[in-house]
């Protein structure tokens, strides 16, 4: 049990729609990262937020966007959904800004998105 | 940039037998190394991590891994597996002290423990 929750657990959308996925981090965790895990693949880094600002981004287009709120919750928004967006979306929270080697990430159980 | 190669996509092993899951990485900067486990329909759980110091790292559930800098490897081992170890295992790296938690994962190794 990592103390990180995600909602919903499953979601079905059609191509072209927009989706919002939610993550609730542990209290005091100022950093949240989002990953996309396609079927049969390892997770891929989408972006990271620290104290409500994006401070790192992977190789994902701008239609993937996020928000982080002061109450340690966050959102991943995906616009203009494509079939290839079907995946498990994982969020991970961390206490600081990766300054210390002991800092680690705690993953949530994920949201499985299916785009038809 | 970093990359991670997990050399086996699937590893079947009999219960109580030893197992080794192989991981090689490539990076132009120093990295921290991790192994995560993912049980069916669940998120990722940290098994162990190498940050510095002793190259043999012990983790949860009886797993250990050895960091080999010259071979850029970080293989995961367990001397005796249980049915409950059936899961997918991911090796990952991230730059050390870079101000980012960005992990680069391998494609995973599915461990199947046969009774």
Image (cartoon, rainbow, N blue to C red):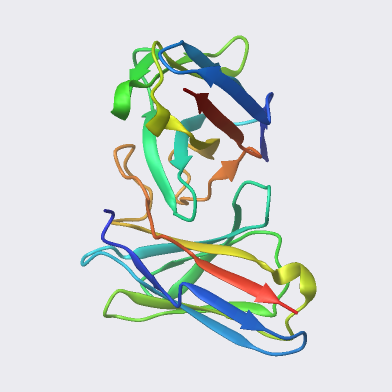
Residue A106: give x, y in percent of width and height. 35, 53
Where, by quadrant of the figure, is residue A92 drawn?
bottom left
On-image quarter of the C terminus of chain A? bottom right
* Quadrant position of residue A71: bottom left
Count all numbered tags in the image, as a single digit.
0
Q: Measuring 51% from the left and 31% from the top, which residue is drawn there? A: B31
Can residue B26 be spotted in the picture?
no
A23 displayed left or right of B68: left
Answer with left or right where residue A93 lies relative to residue A53: left
Residue B47 lies, in percent from the top left, at 37, 33
Q: In this view, does A98 lie above or below A18?
A: above
**Going 65% across and 88% down the picture, which residue do you hit?**
A18
Question: Which of these two is toward me, B6 or A34?
Answer: B6
> What is the x, y in percent for residue B103?
53, 46
Q: Which of B102 and A24 is in front in this view?
A: A24
Q: Is residue B83 left or right of residue B25?
A: left
Q: Can residue A22 be seen in this view?
A: yes
Estimate the x, y position of residue A29 in percent, counting from the top left. Answer: 28, 63
Identify the residue at horizontal 35%, vertical 81% (top origin): A69
Residue appearing at x 55%, y 29% in the figure = B112
Q: Nearer the viewer, residue B10 or B36?
A: B10
The residue lying furthest to the front in this view is B115
Judged from this view, the residue extending furthest toward the bottom is A17
């Amino acid at each position: 049990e990592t103390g990180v929750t995600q909602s919903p657990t499953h979601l079905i959308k059609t191509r072209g729609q927009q989706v919002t996925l939610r993550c609730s981090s542990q209290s005091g965790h100022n950093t949240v990262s989002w990953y996309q895990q396609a079927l049969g693949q390892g997770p891929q880094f989408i972006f990271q937020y620290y104290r409500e600002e994006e401070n790192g981004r992977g190789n994902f287009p701008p239609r993937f966007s996020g928000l982080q709120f002061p109450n340690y919750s966050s959102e991943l928004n995906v616009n203009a959904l494509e079939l290839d967006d079907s995946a498990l979306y994982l969020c991970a929270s961390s206490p600081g800004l990766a300054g210390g080697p002991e800092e680690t990430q705690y993953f949530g159980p994920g949201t499985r998105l299916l785009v038809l | 940039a970093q990359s991670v190669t997990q050399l086996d996509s699937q590893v079947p092993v009999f219960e109580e037998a030893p197992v080794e899951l192989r991981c090689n990485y490539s990076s132009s900067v120093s990295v921290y190394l991790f192994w995560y486990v993912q049980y069916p329909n669940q998120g990722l759980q940290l098994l162990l991590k190498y940050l510095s110091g002793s190259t043999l790292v012990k983790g949860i559930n009886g797993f250990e891994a050895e960091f080999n800098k010259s071979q850029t490897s970080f293989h995961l081992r367990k001397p005796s597996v249980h049915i409950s170890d059936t899961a997918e295992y991911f090796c990952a790296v991230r730059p050390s002290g870079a101000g980012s938690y960005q992990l680069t994962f391998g494609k995973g190794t599915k461990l199947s423990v046969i009774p």
